[in-house]
């Protein structure tokens, strides 16, 4: 096989717009739906029956809070327990973070790391669950 034939077999059209947008953060996030870590966390949380609002997801990411499988299962269990007591908005305290959760929607509304929780005031909750 000649070299020119080998090269022509592997050629494909070049999309300059695609190449230009490759290194922009927005295009990467849109193309694959976010980083693998974010996608994996969303899927894992959905399996546990726990959802994260956009605000809560941003807080977790910006504060470097990672929730393990065990913690997510604990959060799902905490939501179940709070719901059985008639709670609407609960504070769930984990080793990694404090989460304000809308119990009927099973949605984490916001998240605090230990440094941001030091202010000591959490409003708009009617219960707390400590894991």
Image: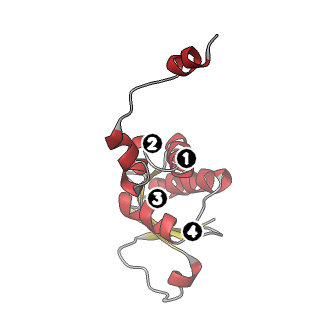
Q: Marks 2 and 4, how far apart in space? A: 21 Å
Residue marked by disc 1: 36
Q: Is residue 91 visible?
A: no
Disc 1 or disc 3, which is closer to the eye? 1
Residue marked by disc 3: 85
| Residue drawn where x is 61% and y is 19% of the image | 3
Residue 79 versus residue 63: which sits nearer the camera? 63
- The secondary element bearing badge 1 is classed as helix
- The secondary element bearing badge 3 is classed as loop
Q: Marks 4 and 1, how far apart in space? A: 15 Å
Q: Is residue 12 visible?
A: yes
- Disc nearer the start of the sequence (2/4): 2
Q: Quadrant of the C terminus?
A: bottom right
Q: Marks 2 and 3, how far apart in space? A: 40 Å
Residue marked by disc 4: 64
- The secondary element bearing badge 4 is classed as loop
- Disc nearer the start of the sequence (1/3): 1
**Few, some or many residues within 10 Å of mark 3 (<14, 14–19, 20+):** few
Name the spot of residue 59 as percent of width and height, x first.
45, 68
- Disc nearer the start of the sequence (2/3): 2
Tell me, for residue 67, which label it has, or none. none
Q: Marks 4 and 3, how far apart in space? A: 32 Å
Name the spot of residue 39 as percent of width and height, x first.
51, 46
């Amino acid at each position: 096989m000649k070299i020119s034939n080998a090269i022509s077999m592997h050629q494909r059209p070049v999309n300059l717009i695609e190449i230009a947008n490759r290194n922009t953060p927005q295009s990467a996030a849109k193309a694959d739906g976010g980083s693998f870590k974010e996608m994996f966390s969303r899927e894992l949380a959905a399996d546990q029956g726990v959802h994260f609002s956009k605000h809560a997801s941003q807080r977790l990411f910006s504060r470097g809070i990672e929730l393990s499988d065990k913690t997510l299962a604990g959060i799902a269990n905490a939501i179940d327990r709070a719901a059985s007591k008639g709670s609407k908005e609960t504070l769930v305290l984990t080793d990694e973070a404090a989460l304000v959760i809308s119990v009927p929607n099973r949605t984490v509304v916001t998240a605090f790391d230990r440094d941001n929780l030091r202010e000591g005031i959490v409003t708009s909750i009617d219960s707390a669950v400590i894991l």
